[in-house]
Each structure stands twice: as structure tokens, then as C-alpha cells.
Amino acid sequence: MKKTACILMTLIMFFFACSEEDKETSVRNFRPLNLSVQVKDGFKVAVFWEEVSNSVSYTLQISDVADFSHVIKDTIVAASGCEIEAFPGYFYLRVRSNNINEEFSSRWQISEFEVVMENAITDLVAGSDSVCILWNCNLDLGSVVLSSEKGDVKVKELSAENLEKKYVVVNDLQPSTSYAVSLFAGNVCVGTGNFKTKAKQSENQIVIDPSLDIDSLLSNLEDGSVIIFEPGTYPIGGKNIEIDGKSVTLQSSSNSEDAVEIYPKSVSLKGKIGSVIFRNLTLSGFAFGGNSYDELNSYFIDFTTDFESLDTLIVEGCTIHHLKNCIIRGNRGAKGEQTVKYIAFRNCIVYNVNREGENSYENFKLDRMEIEEFVLENCTFYDMGHGFFSNRDASSLKNFVIRNCTFDNFGSTDAIDSKYLINVPESDGLFTIENTIFSNTKCYDSESGKHSKGFILGGKGNSYCYNNVFYRFPITPSEVAEWGKIESVFDNYDPKYADRAIGDFTIGCETLKNGGRGGKGIGDLRWIK
């Protein structure tokens, strides 16, 4: 009897032990469902999950290692979702629900996400002894660091007011000096840029009008010259504007690009140059007084055989038209012999360049040149032949951006073989195309509805393609598939231009007016009305 009682007691204890184990397993054997992580602009990450009944809160942790042995963020969240700030990098995130009784709290639900490095600095506005640095993120920024070409380093700590207004002004800089800028959040650099301070205007600012003999003036420019054109037409005698080893700004006295029209043969760059800037000008490749090409007016910018290096080329608010060969020619030097740090076109309209594809030049022909950064923003390019950008036999391109641009009537009718839209086979930098329209290539066969091969996006770096329109503009699928990130491609959405025959690209398609990344419109924003 005693033996039977012992056996019975043992079985009862075993039963309760198993029940407790099952209870523990059943209590914790669930996780927050449908965990969703969305990386947004400005280094923000939105996290959502389904609400768990009887939860009083949720614990969210972020780590840079998969086993969470190094937790860089640990926070309690009341609702079933939140928005957090994150630095560039690859991260692991986990969430669990919390109960008043700890044993009823859930297991962890784990996800992963990546924050791509987007330059937080949006603009650098330089004076002769100061610069205004603007940014677009809400991170807890700490400082900006400026390094001059002479080796001087200047650190500016950011105040609460700077963080609220998202800009800072740094004073006491040297005139006509190149600076590199780094924006820091803690020890993490979230933005970089380059600029050159202006020369003192009292010394080098020159205002001219069409009545003056400007040929000799433009051939004897001083370093740091700021040439301000009064409204009118400037034939320049079909000569080159030569810039040899000097920083020069050419700009209109008006904010309208139509007020000043210049007819140069080309702008020839030679030697070692700090910065060249064009603002609010119209530059025509027509022979002055005629309606045909001047056979000599083949380029807007010509990097000659005597060119060595350039820090910055900026073209803003300009109209450039009727060039026989290309916008910029820069393939004259040996591989690695010529260098450019930064090229940017903003708010420009460019048309009729190598229109019938008579020449094999890409519109930006920069082969063998070591270029660090190339940016196109809010520009329109139409009636142009052959490929767009070529930087073959070079490997320095770190950042290539096309943002909010409109391309129309691109390519040539005799293009049987594939043409590279972008051809940078040796560089492994970051290539980004976003909020841009590519429409109506001349290679498009309206009867078959396709082109045999289409255009190729070529480059071996990290490539991202966000919220773009390809309308009657086929891209070779095998090449697109190699791009690292492709989101929201509006394939064959008709932009419904107002009148593309006369260069009016006002968008009639409502979907494209706010369908871009960040809620912006798609294409050159000046056409969204």
C-alpha cells in the first residue's frame, strides 16, 4: 500500500511539473504579429505591429549584430507602432509585448532593416568669408567640421536653435578658398559637401552690358572674377570664353534665364581651376543672327588637352540649346590625368544637342576623367541624341544623382544597338535616380510597342532607382535587374505633357504630381502646376 501511494504521488508531481512546463510554453509561445519596418526619408524608420491583447506596453530594441549582444537602442512603447531616428547602416530590430505579469509577456519578434546613407546636407551657400550650411534631417546633430585646402580645420558646435531651424552659419573663413564640410551626429558623419568661398566682390565684381567690348574683357579674367551681365544679347564674335587656372562666375543681373543670351564658341577650361559657376544665362550654339548650327559650336563646356583639375562646376537656372556634339566634352586627357571633384546642373533646360545622333558623343562625354560627384536636379533635357552620360576608363565616381528631372525625345533613330543611358563600368560608387521621367525615346517602335534592346543603365556600384516613369522608353531588363534597389517604377504612365513639340512639359497626369519619393512630384518640378 505504501509503495502504491509513493508511485501515485510521483505520478501526480510529474503531471503538475509537465503542466507547468506546458503553461510556460503556451504563455510565451507567441510574438507580436505582422512586424513591419519602413525606412523613410531623413533617417527615419517607422515600425508597426498588430496590437496584442492584455499588453501594457511593448519593448523595442535595435542592434547592429544579429544576436543582440550589442543593443544600441532600448525603448518602451505604449502603442503598437512608433517612429524612430536611425543612423546609416544595417540593423536588427526586435519587439515583444509586456504584461503586468512578466510570465505572460511574449517572445521577441525580429526583423532587419537598412538605412542607406543619404546626404543630410541639402545646400551650401558661400560668401567671401562665410557659409550657410543647410540640412534636412531631425537627428541629434552635434557639430560641423570644415577643412580648408590649406589644412586649416574649423569646428562649429550646433545649438538648439540651429537644430530647430536646420541650418548654421560659419563665419571667419578665407576668401577664394575651397572647403570640405562634414556634418556629425555623435561620431557618425551624416552629411558631406564641398564649396569655395567667393572672392571679395569689391575687388573682382564686374558689371557689363552689350554695348561694351567684352571680347578682350573675357579673355583677361582675374582669379575670383564675378562677371554680371546686364540684359541683352552678347555675340562674343564666335570666340571661346577661356578660363585658364582661375575661379570665375558668369551670371545674369536678372533672375530670368531669358534676359541674357550669349553666343560663345564654347567655354574652354585649362590648367588648375577652383570653381566655375554659371547662373541664369541662355547659351546658344547657333551662329549669331542665324537659325543653323555654327559648325564650331560643338560643346558648352570643353575640357581641353591643357586642362588639369577643377574643384567645382555649377550650372544653375540656365538654358542651353543647339549644340552640335555634346553638353560637356572631357575625354581629351589620358586615363587619370584630369580630375573634377564636383559637377552640378540645377534648374536648367537643355535641348537640341546632337539631335539627330550624327555624332557618337554622349551628352556628357567624360571618359578617362576622374570625377568624384555628378548631380542633376530639377532639370529638363529634350531633343537629344545617343547616350547621356559616359565616364569609362575611370574609377573615382563616388556619387551620381539624377533627381526630379524630365527627359524627352532622347536617342537617335538609327540606334540599332543598345545605348547606355549611364555608362560607368569601373566605378563602384552610389548611383541614385529618383522622381524622374524618361519619355518618348526615338528608339521606340510605335508599331511593335517596344525597342529590341532599349537603353542600358550601366554601373557596378550601389544603385538605387526610386519612383521613376519610363514612358515609351524601354530599359534593358537584364541590366535593370542588377540595380540594388528598385521601387515604384511607373512603367508606361503617360505624363500627358501640355505640348512637348514646343517644349512645354507641364504634366497632366494627376498620379505623377505627387507620386514621387517623399510625396514630391515626378519630373522637373517646374512643370507641375
Image: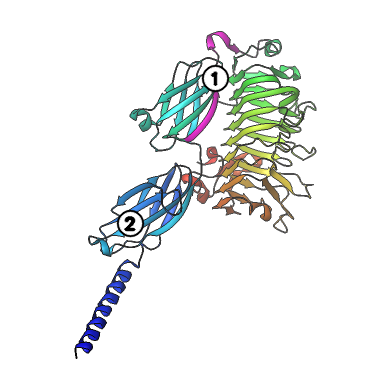
Residue 203, magenta (yes or no):
yes
Query: Mark 1 falls on what kind of element?
Result: loop
Residue 49 visible in this rendered orientation of the protein: yes
Give the labeled residue for mark 2. Answer: 80
- Apparent side of residue 335 relative to residue 83 in the rendered image (left or right): right
Q: Looking at the image, which residue is at 72% across and 26% down? A: 303
Q: Looking at the image, which residue is at 51% across and 19% down? A: 152
Q: Are marks 2 and 1 in contact (CB under 8 Å)?
A: no
214 and 222: which is toward the camera: 222
CA neighbours of label 2 inside 10 A, class few (<14), some (14 to 19), many (20+):
some
Q: Position of residue 365 (x, y in %)?
A: 72, 35
Amino acid type, residue under disc 2 in the picture: Ser
**Pair 2/1: label in front:** 1
Figure quadrant of the N terminus = bottom left
- Apparent side of residue 147 relative to residue 273 in the rendered image (left or right): left
Residue 151 bears which disc, if any? 1
The correct choice, above or below, for 28 with respect to 348 in the image is below
Tell me how far mark 2 sits from mark 1, CA to CA: 51 Å
The correct choice, above or below, for 512 with respect to 368 in the image is below
Q: Position of residue 285 (x, y in %)?
A: 72, 28
Q: Position of residue 491 (x, y in %)?
A: 60, 54
The correct choice, above or below, for 33 with respect to 410 in the image is below
> Outermost residue, top direction?
203
Q: Position of residue 133 (x, y in %)?
A: 46, 27
Residue 474 visible in this rendered orientation of the protein: no
Residue 429: quarter of image: top right
442 and 223: which is toward the camera: 223
Residue 421 bears which disc, if any? none
The residues colored magenta run 189-212
